[in-house]
Amino acid sequence: MFISEKEIEIRYAETDQMGVVYHANYLVWMEIGRTKIIEDLGFTYAGLEADGYISPVIDLSIQYKSSMKYGQKAMVRTWIESHGRLRTIYGYEIVHEDGTIAATATSEHVLVKKESFRPVSLAKIAPDWDLKYKEIRRHKD
């Protein structure tokens, strides 16, 4: 299974009054991880948007395991959990420097035409990208 990794330096602005990372920042880090895996595979999300397509989140699940704090570094690990005709599920682990898991998550996306929001298959608009996702996905549908 192919796993992309991206290190995040935790900034003070990402913490709450208790000194821990505010929960919504994990979602931002997941987006960074998703962008990184796409780039690691040789594609760009910006290119997809320039061609008139977007990939909105249709489902999100996150489990918080242990808190992270200002000054620490987080590692975002991202992989393709599953990839079908219209939907892609990304998997994530956000881990401390010592390897302790801070959070696990999945996000489910569908590819749509920007102007109409009509679903479209990645295989139709970017067959190489679609084949790569099928090759590296964790669960073979």
Image (cartoon, rainbow, N blue to C red):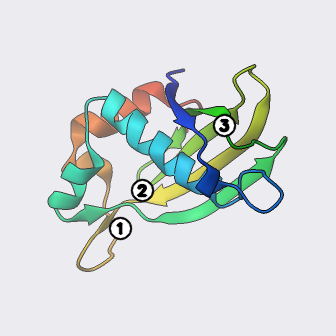
Which quadrant: the C terminus? top right
The image shows residue 139 at horizontal and vertical percentages of 59, 33
Q: Mark 2 = which residue?
A: 86
Can residue 73 be seen from the camera position used here?
yes
Image position of 65 (left or right of 119): right
The quarter holding residue 28 reads: bottom right
Question: Of helix, strand and loop, which one carries label 1?
Answer: loop
The quarter holding residue 25 reads: bottom right
Q: Is there a contact, CB below 8 Å, between mark 1 and mark 2?
A: yes
Question: Of helix, strand and loop, which one carries label 2?
Answer: loop
The image shows residue 69 at horizontal and vertical percentages of 74, 43
- Please report the residue visible at 72 percent of the width from the left and 29 percent of the height from the top: 96
Which quadrant: the N terminus? top right
Q: Mark 3 = which residue?
A: 71
- Please report the residue visible at 48 percent of the width from the left and 50 percent of the height from the top: 31
The mark lying in front, picked from 3 and 1, is: 3
Q: Is there a contact, CB below 8 Å, between mark 3 and mark 1?
A: no
Question: Of helix, strand and loop, which one carries label 3?
Answer: loop
Q: Mark 1 = which residue?
A: 119
Q: Name the amino acid, label 2.
A: Leu
The image shows residue 57 at horizontal and vertical percentages of 51, 63
Q: Name the amino acid, label 3.
A: Gly
